[in-house]
Amino acid sequence: MSGEAMNLTLRVWRQDDAEDAGRFETYNAPDISPDMSFLEMLDVVNEGIIADGGEPIAFDSDCREGICGTCSMVINGVAHGGQQGTTACQLHMRHFRDGDTITIEPWRATAFPVHRDLIVDRTSFERIQQAGGFISVRTGSVPDANATPVPKEDSDLAMDAAQCIGCGACVAACKNASAMLFVAAKVSHLSLMPQGQPERERRALAMVQQMDEEGFGNCTVTGSCEAVCPKEISLDFIARMNREYGRAILKSGCN
Amino acid sequence: MAAKKKTTAAKAKAAKKTTTRKTAPRAAKKVSQKKVPFKLDSGIPAGAMDEKWDKHRFNLKLVNPANKRKYEVIVVGSGLAGASAAATLAELGYNVKCFCYQDSPRRAHSIAAQGGINAAKNYQNDGDSVYRLFYDTVKGGDYRSREANVYRLAQVSVDIIDQCAAQGVPFAREYGGLLANRSFGGAQVSRTFYARGQTGQQLLLGAYSSLNRQIGLGKVKMYPRTEMLDVVLVEGHAKGIVVRDMVTGKISNHSAHAVVLATGGYGNVFFLSTNAMGCNVTAAYRAYKRGAAFANPCFTQIHPTCIPVSGEHQSKLTLMSESLRNDGRVWVPKDKKIAAKIRSGELNPKDIADKDRDYFLERKYPSFGNLVPRDVASRNAKEVCDEGRGVVPSGLGVYLDFADAIKRMGENTVRERYGNLFDMYEKITGSNAYKNPMTIYPAVHYTMGGLWVDYNLMSNLPGLFAIGEANFSDHGANRLGASALMQGLADGYFVLPYTIGQYLANVGIDDRPNQDDPAFSAVQQEVETRINNLLSINGDRTPTSFHRELGKIIWDNCGMSRNKKGLEEAIQIIPKLRKEFWQNLSVPGENASLNQSLEHAGRVADFLEFGELMCRDALQREESCGGHFREEHQTPEGEAKRNDAKFSFVGAWEYQGENKTPKLHKETLAYEEVKMTQRSYK
């Protein structure tokens, strides 16, 4: 499984806080095992930085198994590093070569201000979900789960959308910093389920409105979001959301 | 939208006004050292097992609907238990403050649970029932859980599925549109509901959506990237917490009528575990240091199907869902010489004829085969590797082979069932499991121990509740697969929201101290001092290096199998490591900024104390049960040998002060319904 250790050069974005202008700094990453994950490589580099009296590179990660959506970095110009359907934490060093120079940057978007180094503030995503990303049910006031059959095709398609991990790579990859894929995933998931029907229009309108208020850009359907999405969420869902939104506008009387 | 926001803000303001006015007299009180005397009263209701919960709910005091908005509840943690509790409490009308260290409540580690959630729906008509789920859970826990709690868990399990389906959770379905089930490790009925291999994610996103709705309505105030560093007691009651804003470093305190800890497990004491990087014991351990009993800390679960360690750089371990054992077959070569050749790369698994393979779980446990409970599967994997029959370079790994499953049902069906797991496996190892068998090895996964709680899920400190993995009550010495999600949601949706009412109704609306109460500033001062201490040591070793060293001590001496000598040694070594930590730690940077080294250092400091407590608990428990395997206590066949006469109790530890031996209290476990037997999966 294991191969030869590699020596790499890292160009890493360092920024003290949201006010700081930020700059690239260069680090050596010697003796890197191809079995390491990308973040484990950064861990090793950070231990070295601390030993040299510096401050380690701040980056977000938590589950390190590709599901929590915490890790967020642009590697060599591509959100999550360019391996199809893979978060940065699941990217392994066997995909790099000895002598490579790797550039690492945070997500860059107006709606995602930098907290520090590679860590950004994604609470704009939270506010979009709070605006309508739910079905209004009170605990306990629900029918038996099998009282509402859901066609398997619908449920499977809803699951394709619901897999979104909310990492924000779609925004980072988009030249307009649009959050359409993220919002479309939730709007589609819930509008495909029978339980989501009563609030279907209200949800689409509220989430889109909040998305616009947060300063995300518009969608010009370049598909860069789909290309970097670690859950490979399809662009089709954006088309679906556009239909949902149009439908909602018509039903609500063009307000 | 704007108008709505205003109304909510106005409401919140009004509510605040009310509380301030009513609680003003409290501010005059001195820091009270008055303690509630230590006692463990499980408060299990009398009566028949199947009527206890019903009767208890009737007997619980209710808070008048109009008064609920005058109460404030703090929920720490936003995983399945925390998010479901926060949302449900807010729906009931309480004001909730919810805290999480992640940047969003959606990222709590419940998200990583793969396989599924159990519920006694009996949709498969295969003989399941509340009683059977209860029985399986008590037996699976090796008779070290509290019967009444487990029965209630099984009862409310059916409501959870209804709740989640109504939230729009896209569960797996059959072509008729009804919910699909699968069987899961340790169970002989199909009672596990799932959403591909991402059940935890979908259930958490369901709870998160309910939480978001309440945040939007202004009933929950969410504090992401905020870490709880201590609990504040006023006259012995938990009335608030001290937190650190992880972006600015600001330390602040929050007061409430009650505090709910939904802070997960302590698996990261082992350094390597399947827990997320940030999972920690700090909230629970701080509560322990303030007087909450810590129950059964030595009960940890080692999950059999994880990806083996690849090297010293390893930062965490990755679990492959246990559902893989439904179709995968676990084996190693019969001959250790062949195993050695596999390790050196001279032989491939495919070169090994069937007659030279040892499908050791099928051989030893013919009726359960590869589906034996986790502790049994893990221990057997360790055993064959200890015999020199491991198949990965480190020697610590066995095969999980899908060749037969692919032959039987085709690659497409296998892909449909496990595709995402196979993909994940390939990403990490670079190996294609459709073509070559997976390699797996046990890893720390879940902790059954936790804060001691009574039937109401309240700790021995009044006003302090613990739910989900953070408490100890439902899984005994071993948790069954697909039961963690069930328990988290049971506690959060259907148990705590009722039981907390009893406490709140008893203490009344006025029992919320003003934050000017000197108890708050005193605790905050302690927290600040501690942080300054961590920053001012200026030694040579990073928090990670201490954490890794501690983890190795715990894994070697208090891991999959334990013995007296090892545990005694660990109890000697850990304080030395702790001493070195406080003399030679290096934390760069300052408090007043985002400082991940500082966050880690604080957590490691608590692990360094907690690890010793774990070893003490493992040492006192002179028996083997579930995940706690004491080498001195095994049957001739090498199975765990319980000692019911002496150890049929919950071991609850009371903190006695710095560098003092904690005191063990025992809650006797009485089994009315389930007859205690030697677990057998033969």
Image: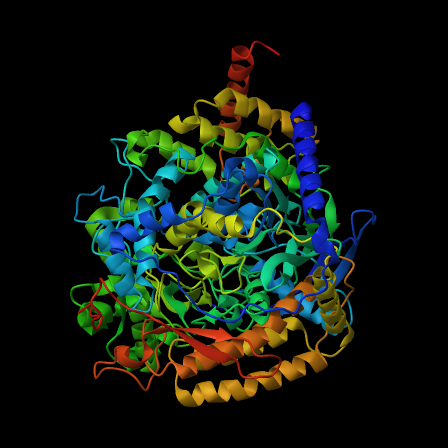
Viewer-proximal residue among B278 and B52: B52
Does the image show residue A220? no
Quick one: which residue is furthest to the top in this view?
A253
Q: Residue B126, image x and y in percent?
A: 17, 47
| Rendered position, B618 above or below A184 | below
Question: According to the image, what is the colour scheme of the structure?
Answer: rainbow
Picture quarter containing residue B425? bottom left
Q: Is residue B605 visible?
A: yes
Left-right relation of B183 to B206? left
Between residues B339 and B365, which one lies in front from this camera angle? B365
Up/down of A229 relative to A176, above or below:
below
Name the residue rendered at 78%, 64% in the picture.
B590
Residue A249 as seen in the image, left or right of residue B536 = left
**In the rendered image, which quarter contains the C terminus of chain A?**
top right
Q: Position of residue B675 (x, y in %)?
A: 20, 67
Residue that protrudes farthest toward the front in the picture? B25
Q: In this rendering, would A78 be left or right of B117?
A: right
